[in-house]
Every structure is written in C-alpha cells, then in structure tokens.
C-alpha cells in the first residue's frame, strides 16, 4: 500500500479539505483521511490542489494533426470536414499509433486520466478491411497504454455518407458492410466476455458502442447498435444535433429530430451519451433528461466549427447529466471546456452563475467517468480508482488566490500548464509537469509531420 498526502483536496461539493491522506492499494483508493496536518511517514506529498483525474469523454485523437491547419479563412463545419477527410484518408495503423500516443500524451499532461475515443476510422483505403479488422482500434488501445491513460474505445457504426447517400471514397474507410458486420467486428474487439472490460487489452481499457450520427446510421441499424450495447451493459454514444443541417435532414427523411429518431431506436438510457446536443428542441431536452442520459459538450470544438452553444442548464434541469470532451483536439484544455459551459451560456443568455465551479468540475470528472463506463472512477473516495491530478497554485494564473477561492480560480482561470502531477491507478504518469515516459512535444511534432497530407 502507498499513501499520497494532499495539501488541499476537492472531495466533491463547493468546499476543499486541507491535509488529506489518500491510501492506495493496487489500483484503488483504500481510505481517505481528512485533517491530516502533515505528510505521514513514507507518503508522497502532492502540492497544490488535488482533484480526481479528469475525463475527456469525446475525442478523435487523429484530428490533433489538423491543429493550425484549419483555422484560417471562412467556411463551416462542412468545409472543415473536407480537410478532416483528407487527413483521415492518409492514415494507417502505424501512423494512428504515433499520432494517438502523442495526443494522449498531451492529454495526460493536461490532467486527463481517462479518454473516450469515438472511433470510426476502421478500415484501409477504399474500405478494404485490414488483416486484423480491428487493427486501427488496436493501435488506439496501444497508444493509450503507452501514454499511461485509461481509455474507452467507443466503436462507431457508420454505414451511409448521409441520409440516403452512399459513402464516398474516404467514408468507405469508416463503413462496415452492414450493422451485423459492425457487431461481429466489435465483438472481436471487446473480447473477455463483456464489453465493459477486456483482459486482453489490460485494465486500462473498456469498450462501448457508438452510433456515429443519424446521418451515417439509419434507424433500423441504430436499433441493432442500441441492442448490442444494452445486452452488454456498455456505454452508447452518438453525435446528436451538432448542426442545424443535421436536424433538417433528419426531419425531412424521418419526420423526427435526431434525438427522437434515437429514442425510437431504443438508444436513450442512463448509458447513453448525446455528444454536442447543441441544436436540441424542448422535446429533445425532455427526452434526454427523462432518460437520465448524459450530454457531452465539447465547447472549444463547437466554437471552432461555428456549431453553436448547447443548452447545458436546460439539459441539467430536465435531468440530464453533463460530461466534457475535446472532440477535434483543436486544443486540449479540460478546464477551458469546463468553464466554457458556463461562460458561453452567459453570452447567450445574459445571465451569470448557472453552473457553479463544483458542478462544472463534476462534469469534468465523475460525469465523464460515468459516461465512459467507469462508474468506479472520477471521485476521491474509498473503493474508487486511484486516478488523481494535482494542480499547482504557484504559477502565474493561480498565485495569490486564497484557499477559499481556489476552486473557483482553478475552474475559471486554470490551464493545462498548471497540472503538476497526474496519477493513474496509483502510479505517476506525469510528475512535476513532465510525462514520465514520453517526450510529448517531440512525439507530436514527428507524428504530425508524418500524417499531414
Ligand atoms: Zn466528434
């Protein structure tokens, strides 16, 4: 057993605890002792503010290679997508391993201990499966292991180029022949009896399903994916109403919004996460809230792509839970995603204070862990996974903040650069601001240079 001693720790709620000893046995927290004034003998001291590890609930790791290449000029989500497709068309499993490992390394440095990789780039050029039909997913799993972060691979079913439209050449790489072929392939990935975990992949990995969107998956196929996830008690994610054009196409084809189509397919439940939920109607909000579904907002990407501002407060009021994602990885700043939920809504509504710092932090930790099928993480309590982040308070952003204002300051002004230590399963992955095994900036430079077309 080992012990970490936190100068200050957030154990949930609006306040902080001073002097917290966290006993760890194996991968899990065994005991949490508060009011321990000085570090116990042989303990590891964690300076600053200790939080549960952060969950990045929605990522497409390879899109990190687009950073700095898509921000200039005009356009929309749809013109950005053309640039993304050009990159996707150039990747193979080896390049995926390099770029994903570097990207997950960047996430670890930002305090991310669990990533949800929404994975749709399955096959080789022209849609030809690799000899191992899950070679791309295997590369992603290996990348997370080497970067030291936990991962849920959300394997996305993708069948159509749009509603009633066949896939184009790049989209063929995302597509299985039909939904049964998708299920058979994913069963091969999620070995080990149930989709919740896999011995073959190690304790760092769990699996779930995804319906890419109602654009790419028809309602009958969506119901098969939903049943697959239900039968395995696995998480189920879908891109939902990121763009008004998606709603219009869905209403034209099905006479229903994407959320209503997914409800009809049996997708909505407590295991379901609607990614974005930007342009949802009042009825959609009631459906998502009534199902106690999770909504994963990705504000830095939604800004970058001119998507819009999701109705986070109304979703919460209706009963939905929140999680946060870096999505396109245009930036990897989990604390920015958290505060943007509140700050973007202030701009849209003219009202301040709809989400407290502790509530925003909840979305960044326990909300994300639950969304990704790890209800045993995202909190500092006995029995939970020993995933911790220490935020330094002696840097330029947080210096001069008193203890009682520290939680607000971390959420509203903190940055990835303030992450000092990251512990996953009781082991340091980042120590004193440096990744313990990877030279992340160098890896990013070489991986991106390799894959940019
Ligand atoms: Zn996405």
Image (tube, rainbow, N blue to C red):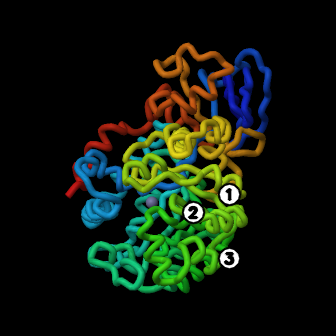
Circles 2 and 3: CB atoms closer than 8 Å: no
Q: Residue at x 61, y 28 (%)?
A: 408
Among all residues in the image, which is located at the extreme front? 350
Under circle 1, the secondary element is: loop
Task: Indicate the secondary structure of the residue bearing disc 2.
Answer: strand
Find the distance from the CA under tag 1 to the CA under tag 3. Answer: 23 Å
| Mark 2 or mark 3: whose residue is earlier in sequence | 3
Point out residue 350 in the picture as x, y percentages from the top left corner. 56, 40
**Distance from the alpha carbon under mark 2 to that under mark 3:** 19 Å
Q: Name the residue located 36 percent from the left edge and 78 percent from the top edge.
A: 161
- Depth check: give the residue in front, 39 or 315: 315
**Earlier-in-chain disc, 2 versus 1:** 2
Tell me the distance, in whole angstroms, between the alpha carbons under discs 2 and 1.
10 Å
Which picture quadrant has residue 219? bottom right
Q: Is residue 339 left or right of residue 396?
A: right
**CB of mark 2 within 8 Å of CB of mark 1?**
yes
Q: Mark 2 points at which residue?
A: 274
Residue at the image point whose x is 64% and y is 58% from the top: 294
Pointer 3: what residue? 231
Residue 320's mark?
1
User: Which element carries disc 3, helix, strand or loop?
Assistant: helix
At a point 67% along the width and 28% down the height, the residue shown is: 4
Q: In which quadrant of the rendered image does the N terminus lie?
A: top right
């Amino acid at each position: 057993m080992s012990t970490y001693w936190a100068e200050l720790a957030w154990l949930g709620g609006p306040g902080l605890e001073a002097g917290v000893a966290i006993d760890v046995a194996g991968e899990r927290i065994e005991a949490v002792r508060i009011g321990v004034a000085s570090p116990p003998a042989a303990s590891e001291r964690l300076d600053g503010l200790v939080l549960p590890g952060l969950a990045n609930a929605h990522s497409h790791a390879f899109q990190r290679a687009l950073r700095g290449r898509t921000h200039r000029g005009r356009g929309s989500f749809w013109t950005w997508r053309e640039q993304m497709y050009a990159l996707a068309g150039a990747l193979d499993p080896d390049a995926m391993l390099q770029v994903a490992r570097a990207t997950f390394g960047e996430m670890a440095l930002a305090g991310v201990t669990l990533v949800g990789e929404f994975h749709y780039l399955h096959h080789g050029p022209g849609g030809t499966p690799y000899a191992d039909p899950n070679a791309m997913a295997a590369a992603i799993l290996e990348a997370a292991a080497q970067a030291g972060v936990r991962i849920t691979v959300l394997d996305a079913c993708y069948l159509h180029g749009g509603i009633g439209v066949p896939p184009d050449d790049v989209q063929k790489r995302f597509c299985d022949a039909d939904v049964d072929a998708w299920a058979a392939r994913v069963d091969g990935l999620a070995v080990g009896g149930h989709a919740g975990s896999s011995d073959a992949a190690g304790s760092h990995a769990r699996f779930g399903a995804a319906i890419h969107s109602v654009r790419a998956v028809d309602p009958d196929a969506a119901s098969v994916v939903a049943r697959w996830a239900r039968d395995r008690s696995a998480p189920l994610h879908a891109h939902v109403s990121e763009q008004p054009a998606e709603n219009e196409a869905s209403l034209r084809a099905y006479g229903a919004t994407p959320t209503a189509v997914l409800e009809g397919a049996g997708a909505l439940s407590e295991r379901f996460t609607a990614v974005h939920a930007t342009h949802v109607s009042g009825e959609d909000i009631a459906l998502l809230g009534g199902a106690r579904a999770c909504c994963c907002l990705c504000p830095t990407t939604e800004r970058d792509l001119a998507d819009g501002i999701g109705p986070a407060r109304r979703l919460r009021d209706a009963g939905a839970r929140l999680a946060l994602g870096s999505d396109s990885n245009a930036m990897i700043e989990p604390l920015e995603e958290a505060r943007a939920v509140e700050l973007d809504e202030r701009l849209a509504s003219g009202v301040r204070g709809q989400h407290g710092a502790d509530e925003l932090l909840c979305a960044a930790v326990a909300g994300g862990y639950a969304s990704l099928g790890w209800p045993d993480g995202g909190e500092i309590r006995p029995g939970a996974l020993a995933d911790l982040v220490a935020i330094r308070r002696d840097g330029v952003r947080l210096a001069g903040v008193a203890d009682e204002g520290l939680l607000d300051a971390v959420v509203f002004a903190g940055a990835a650069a303030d992450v000092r230590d990251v512990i996953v399963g009781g082991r340091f992955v980042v120590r004193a601001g440096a990744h313990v095994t990877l030279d992340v900036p160098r890896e990013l430079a070489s991986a991106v240079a390799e894959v940019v077309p």
